Image (cartoon, rainbow, N blue to C red):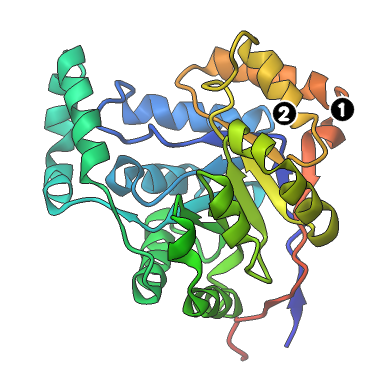
């Protein structure tokens, strides 16, 4: 068995793909593709999506942009949340519904409210295993760089069988790393019980509240920490100052931000580069597996 080591690099600023493909995002598919391509051109390598974003269309768009150049990017996706049957039924009609929804602020708010109320959680080992395969198909990838559980409750991830699902997916070459996107400190504590945890994703308040736990995990176990919702929690700070300040922290691998503006993305990349010393090397973080990825190529 040959040993493969992932030498992909994470950019200190990651692109959050939560609005890509959503009903209330006014951007066209063409403009969205251009924005993602622009992100790659200016050095962003980390793309953070999820199977529920845009009813799966976020993963599809990311996969389309990365087709033929997946080795230049680091793809993070998340599983574990599910949409209702009604939301799945609406997806084929999205091209017709989006223009109507985006003409009305009331309609956009209603869709957002219904979406939030329509999501449930399924972290059963059987569901997670199937969700990995579905994400691979939508992304068009052979391997997902990092697969995260999506905002679970602490008690929902303390299931030994989940660890076995992740390990099987890694040995099968379906994922390189696994982790948990946490909404609170209790989830962080539960996630750290996974012996082979590779990634944590948290918002700034959780990063601060669990700083001792997270700092130790980074130092002793090499866990990579992604920070989301930085701009939402910036307070009086400018977006650039908030993002660059977080990116400069030794316990943060990447700050994930979502935007529909290329110029805004340019500003944030510039601020992040300045915050980490201005060099290209400082803007990229190595992502090295502690355990080997098996060679799944058939002999002959």
Secondary element at tag 2: helix
- Relative to 237, say whether 140 is above or below: below
Position of 107 with respect to 55 (left or right) is left
The residue at the point 52 percent across, 78 percent down is 160
| Any part of residue 45 in sight | no
Q: Position of residue 225 (x, y in %)?
A: 68, 46
Neighbours of disc 1 within 10 Å: few (<14), some (14-19), many (20+): few
Please say if 270 is above or below 141: above
Q: Quadrant of residue 193?
A: bottom right
Crowdedness near tag 2: few (<14), some (14–19) or many (≥20) residues, C-alpha within 10 Å: many
User: Which element type, helix, strand or loop, lies under badge 1?
Assistant: loop
Q: In this rendered view, identify the residue nearer to me: 252 or 295.
A: 252
The residue under the point 31% across, 40% down is 54
Q: Residue at x 16, y 15 (%)?
A: 106
Camera sees residue 58:
yes
The numbered mark at residue 108 is: none
Q: How far apart, in angstroms, are the residues tagged by discs 2 and 1?
A: 17 Å
Residue sitting nearer the eye, 146 or 63? 146
Q: Position of residue 167 (x, y in %)?
A: 58, 77
| Residue 279's disc number | 1
Tally of numbered discs: 2
Of residues 222 and 283, which is closer to you in this image?
222
> Which residue in the structure is indicated by mark 2?
246
In this rendering, position of residue 217 left or right of residue 58: right
Mark nearer the viewer, 2 or 1: 2
Vertical order, 51 against 206 (above or below): below
């Amino acid at each position: 068995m040959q040993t493969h080591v992932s030498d992909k690099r994470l950019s200190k600023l990651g692109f959050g793909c939560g609005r890509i493909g959503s009903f209330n995002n006014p951007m066209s598919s063409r403009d969205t593709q251009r924005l993602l391509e622009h992100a790659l051109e200016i050095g962003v390598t980390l793309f953070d999506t999820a199977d529920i974003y845009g009813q799966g269309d976020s993963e599809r768009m990311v996969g389309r942009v990365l087709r033929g150049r997946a080795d230049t990017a680091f793809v993070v996706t998340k599983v574990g949340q599910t949409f209702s049957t009604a939301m799945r039924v609406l997806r084929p009609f999205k091209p017709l519904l989006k223009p109507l929804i985006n003409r009305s602020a009331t309609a956009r708010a209603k869709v957002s409210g219904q979406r939030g109320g329509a999501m449930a959680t399924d972290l059963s080992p059987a569901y997670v295993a199937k969700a990995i395969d579905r994400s691979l198909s939508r992304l068009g990838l052979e391997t997902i760089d990092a697969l995260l559980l999506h905002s679970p409750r602490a008690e929902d991830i303390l299931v030994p069988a989940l660890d076995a699902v992740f390990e099987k997916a890694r040995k099968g070459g379906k994922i390189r790393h696994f982790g948990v996107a946490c909404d609170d400190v209790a989830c962080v504590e539960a996630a750290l019980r996974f012996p082979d945890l590779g990634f944590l994703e948290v918002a700034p308040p959780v990063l601060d509240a669990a700083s001792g736990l997270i700092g130790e995990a980074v130092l002793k176990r090499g866990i990579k920490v992604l920070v989301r919702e930085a701009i939402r929690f910036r307070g009086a700070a400018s977006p650039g100052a908030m993002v660059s300040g977080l990116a400069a922290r030794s316990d943060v691998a990447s700050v994930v931000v979502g935007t529909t503006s290329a110029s805004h993305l340019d500003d944030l990349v510039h601020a992040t580069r300045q915050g980490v010393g201005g060099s290209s090397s400082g803007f990229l973080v190595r992502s090295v597996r502690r355990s080997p990825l098996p060679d799944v190529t058939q002999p002959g």
